[in-house]
């Protein structure tokens, strides 16, 4: 093959898939092999087990090698996407050049025309929109409606969440597309839609929680929670931040604190990796980290403690008595929640934020 010849995206993805484990060891070095999968925290090579890459294909072409899914965000794609995201590349030509370098293939001669036939975003979702793009997320957000009187409200109340009158970052879509992976059929389910925003309030992504038809549970699908768009550093936000913020992983976890501390600004970062990488508001002086009781949660806490110390921000950890604060709320009640949080708060924040239970 001469330097003038080039490999298109499909050829490169296939060749990378034939060397899937080697690709993972190089670009996702923080992960490890587990059976036929490579497990790692996310596409940015954070430690964890949320993202899994299939290393070998299954029979009859199902479960193709090199395909990956992030269980926390719902992002999915092939190994070209892994190269792009792990290295922070923007132009597909740079991704292709890096793939050829890794595969020891000759580089093509410079071209004037743009590469065709492949989106710069993640693989397409069931609506035909690129599931990694902020524009697609904003379109879904615009098509959704407030949660009042919807199955999203039913779902939240089923989780014992009742302060729902002023939550502009949450909406509802009655027929949100769902597809488990690129080889699966499209389904539609009702879904709670949460806006992921940057520090300026601009919608950069959305998080979807697909719901059962009665709203009293999650939809019976493989991954009922997924995010799309630009997530890194951003969050689902409740309340305007001045000097104090509480941040955790899950939406229901954050809203559980809202039940007893309604004036406390909150951020749900949607995964431990994104929690660890959150961007601090410029006025922030004290950060409460809502700790999930698992190794990934511990890693996020450790990372944030180091980052806040460097930034001159006080960092305090709030730990639930059970698995998470929503479990504390549901099984122990608001009075117990208040008692659990009281000694963990800075003294000046007790009177400022920890309201007496009135319902």
Image (tube, rainbow, N blue to C red):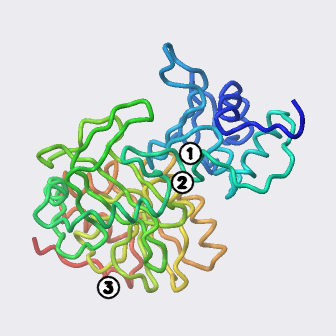
The residue beneath circle 3 is 352
Categorize mark 1 by other alpha carbons within 10 Å: few (<14), some (14-19), many (20+): many
Left or right placement of residue 209 versus residue 65 in this view: left
Of callouts 3 and 2, which one flags the residue occurring earlier in the amino acid sequence?
A: 2
The single residue placed furthest to the front in the displayed view is: 113
Disc 1 to disc 2, C-alpha distance = 7 Å
In which image quadrant can residue 333 be found? Answer: bottom left
Helix, strand or loop at disc 1? loop
114 up-or-down from 13: above or below = below
Q: Where is residue 3 in the image (x, y as percent from the top left)?
A: 89, 39
Q: Is residue 216 visible?
A: yes
Between marks 1 and 3 in the image, the one whose residue lies nearer the viewer: 1
Categorize mark 3 by other alpha carbons within 10 Å: few (<14), some (14-19), many (20+): few
The residue beneath circle 1 is 41
The residue beneath circle 2 is 273
* Tag 1 and tag 2, C-beta contact below 8 Å: yes
Which image quarter holds the C terminus? bottom left
Q: Which residue is drawn at 23% across and 60% down?
A: 172
Q: Position of residue 1 (x, y in %)?
A: 87, 29
């Amino acid at each position: 093959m001469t330097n003038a010849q080039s490999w298109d995206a499909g050829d490169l993805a296939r060749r990378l898939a034939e060397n899937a484990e080697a690709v993972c060891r190089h670009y996702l070095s923080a992960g490890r092999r587990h059976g036929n999968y490579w497990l790692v925290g996310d596409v940015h090579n954070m430690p964890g087990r949320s993202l899994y890459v299939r290393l070998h294909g299954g029979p009859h072409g199902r479960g193709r090698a090199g395909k990956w899914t992030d269980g926390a965000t719902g992002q999915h794609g092939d190994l070209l996407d892994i190269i792009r995201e792990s290295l922070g590349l923007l132009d597909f030509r740079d991704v292709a050049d890096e793939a050829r370098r890794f595969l020891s293939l000759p580089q093509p001669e410079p071209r004037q025309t743009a590469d065709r036939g492949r989106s710069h975003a993640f693989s397409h979702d069931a609506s035909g929109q690129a599931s990694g793009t902020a524009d697609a997320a904003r379109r879904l957000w615009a098509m959704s409606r407030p949660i009042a009187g919807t199955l999203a409200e039913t779902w939240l109340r089923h989780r014992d969440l009742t302060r729902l009158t002023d939550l502009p970052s949450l909406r509802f879509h009655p027929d949100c597309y769902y597809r488990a992976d690129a080889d699966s059929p499209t389904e539609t389910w009702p879904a709670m839609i949460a806006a992921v925003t940057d520090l300026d309030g601009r919608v950069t992504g959305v998080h979807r929680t697909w719901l059962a038809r009665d709203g009293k549970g999650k939809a019976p699908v493989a991954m009922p929670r997924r995010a799309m768009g630009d997530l890194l550093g951003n969050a689902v936000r409740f309340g305007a931040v001045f000097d104090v913020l509480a941040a955790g992983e899950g939406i229901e976890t954050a809203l559980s604190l809202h039940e007893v501390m309604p004036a406390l600004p909150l951020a749900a970062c949607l995964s431990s990796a994104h929690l660890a990488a959150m961007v601090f508001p410029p006025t922030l002086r004290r950060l409460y980290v809502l700790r999930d009781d698992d190794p990934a949660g511990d890693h996020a806490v450790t990372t944030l403690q180091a980052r806040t110390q460097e930034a001159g921000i006080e960092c305090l950890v709030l730990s639930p008595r059970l698995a998470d604060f929503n479990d504390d709320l549901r099984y122990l009640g608001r009075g117990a929640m208040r008692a659990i949080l009281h000694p963990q708060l800075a003294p000046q924040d007790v009177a400022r934020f920890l309201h007496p239970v009135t319902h």
